[in-house]
Amino acid sequence: MTGYADLDGAGPVDEGVLDAMAATLLHRGPDSGGRYVRDGVGLGFRRLSIVGLEGGEQPVRNEDGSVVMVCNGEIFNHRELRAELEAKGHRFRTNTDVEVLVHLYEEHGTGLLDRLNGQFAFAIHDSRRRRLFLARDPMGILPLYHARTPRHFVFGSEIKAVLQHPEVERRVDLTGLDQVLTFPGTVSPRTLFRGISSLENGHYLLVEDGDVRKVKYWDLDYPPDGEAPDEMSDADRLETLGGLLEESVRRRLQADVPVGYYLSGGLDSSLIGALVHRVGTGGTPNSFSISFGDEDIDESRFQRKMARHLGSRHHETLFRPADIAAELRRMVLHAECPVKETYNTCSMALSAAVRESGTRVILTGEGADELFAGYLGYRFDLVRRPAAGDPFEDDLRRRLWGDPQIFYERDYHAWRESKLDLYAPDVRDAFAEVDCLAHPVVDPEMLRGRHPVHQRSYLDFKLRLTDHLLSDHGDRMALANSVEARYPFLDPEVVRFATTMPPRLKVTERTEKYALKQVARGLVPDEIIHREKFGFRAQGSPALLRQGVEWVEDLLSYDRIKRQGYFDPDVIENLKKQYRQPGFEIHPHLGDDLLLTVLTFGVLLDTFALPDNT
């Protein structure tokens, strides 16, 4: 979806501009398109037909046409909501799930967000109130970008749609680049494009009377004392969690097109696959995995074992190092940001295999690690808390997290000093303004007084999951091939229950994701349940350099890096020499692939015609 609104009143909407914005989103909606223009507001839409295949075109209107909506996403509890709304006299025109939104808005206004179980980004125009209402789902599964120009408010499901508006300038946000080098990726509302913001998960926008107002309606909220005040036994908690996950999978199998699931070879996707088969889809489900032909990173043995265990119709995609270079530029076009891992290219190849099979919806396991303590850091937090020492680091943690005792990922002060060397002299001179650590990225109040496991969960959710794993790695790589990804672990009921579970049920000194492993018993082979965590990864920039790809060499050339003015060309040359050394590899968990960030940033500059830093 995309569109724009005149902030001064009911100025004209250029339908050619609106259509050009929508055309950039063809991959997100290849089946049909629609447009709405009224009172200085234009809405554009491209549809990927999943539910209500016939007659489900958007925009969708209420009975008298005063409320008009476009929505990218799915409402999983639409049947219950529809029955309730019909009982109140609302008349539906389609069989689509998202039509409930216009009628819920009539009943509840912005409060409709409290009634939804789904993944969505939508825009509703209320012509009577001369209001534009936009929202992003609580988990941030679907993206929503926006920009304000002197005359217009502009929005879109992807940045490329926003850039089609003639008043939106193409400029680099250096603080967004600094976030990529510091955190797992960008953190909403920041993007790599100055003046273009990403609406945070669990937020909505109201555009009315020439003003744009942002409101938070949801956040991941853990109890301050670590445990919710109830008397459930551990056995009851585990049984409840299993039931919630099964119901979540059942909801996400709703579709009028084929649905499949990813198999990575790990616990999370295997449990989802097992629940798909338990719930039943009326046929043999399709499962999809990727293999590398490199035993250091390949998990195909476990993927095949689980596929045989479940009896799925399994599809395996072989991905070789040469495929990374072949897909990297297209990947950046869709991710709309630089990355420091190449595995997005693998994810895009995997969604291509899904599309080729005729499957249109895929279930995947993101969210389990962040909600159920799946990373090694959760175990570390049980046995150590950083002692006060470096006053600069303590001050940074206090400003970032509200507590100098909270350690997340790295010592940021030391990393800031190292990172500075990477930048060009002009950027270093202006670094006080560029430094992402000088800007808040989370609400410290949501960390204060929480258990260390819950503190890390909140930070993982905000800094890793929403804007990286769900956005550039998830939504963008799936919809690059017109495939919709769904996330059973991120069902609102599952998330709500996860916040009430005591940390001891999530992680022990010996194991992560304890509760999920207990739920998986009898559904997933023990060999997979008790595997050491093996993060999905592919070969990085050292492998690309060894291939001698001409365009890679050009983007990393001394003259180009110097001309662009973002990075220090001498430092980049030294990194290239280091990365080319025989046997050199970057640690998959402890090292940053700096050259890949520089390379994909160069691709971003070229792809989106962004200016040099002069």
Image (cartoon, rainbow, N blue to C red):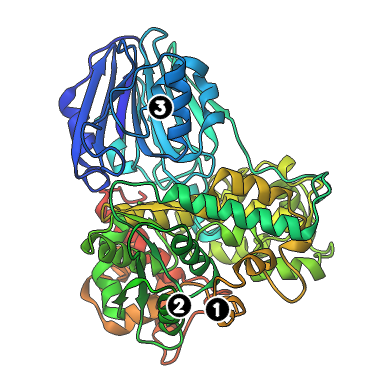
- Please name the amino acid that badge 2 sits on: His
Labelled pair 2, 1 in contact (Cβ < 8 Å): yes
Q: Circle 2 is placed at which residue position?
A: 309
At label 3, the amino acid type is: Val
**CB of mark 1 within 8 Å of CB of mark 3?**
no
Q: Earlier in the sequence, mark 2 or mark 1?
A: 2
**Corner quadrant of residue 337:** bottom left
Q: Residues within 10 Å of mark 3 (few under 14, many from 20)?
A: many
SS label for mark 3: helix
Q: Amino acid at mark 1?
A: Pro
Q: CA distance from mark 1 to mark 3?
A: 41 Å
Residue 498 in sight from this viewpoint: yes
Numbered disc 2: secondary structure: helix
As drawn, which residue projects farthest toward the left?
A: 16
Q: Nearer the viewer, residue 380 or 549?
A: 380
Instruction: Identify the image quadrant of residue 284.
Output: bottom left
Decide if residue 14 is on the left or right side of residue 537: left
Q: Give percent across and percent down for residue 98.
A: 37, 32
Residue bearing the label numbered 3: 100
Pointer 1: what residue? 525
Badge 1: few (under 14), some or many (20 or more) residues near its Cα, within 10 Å? some
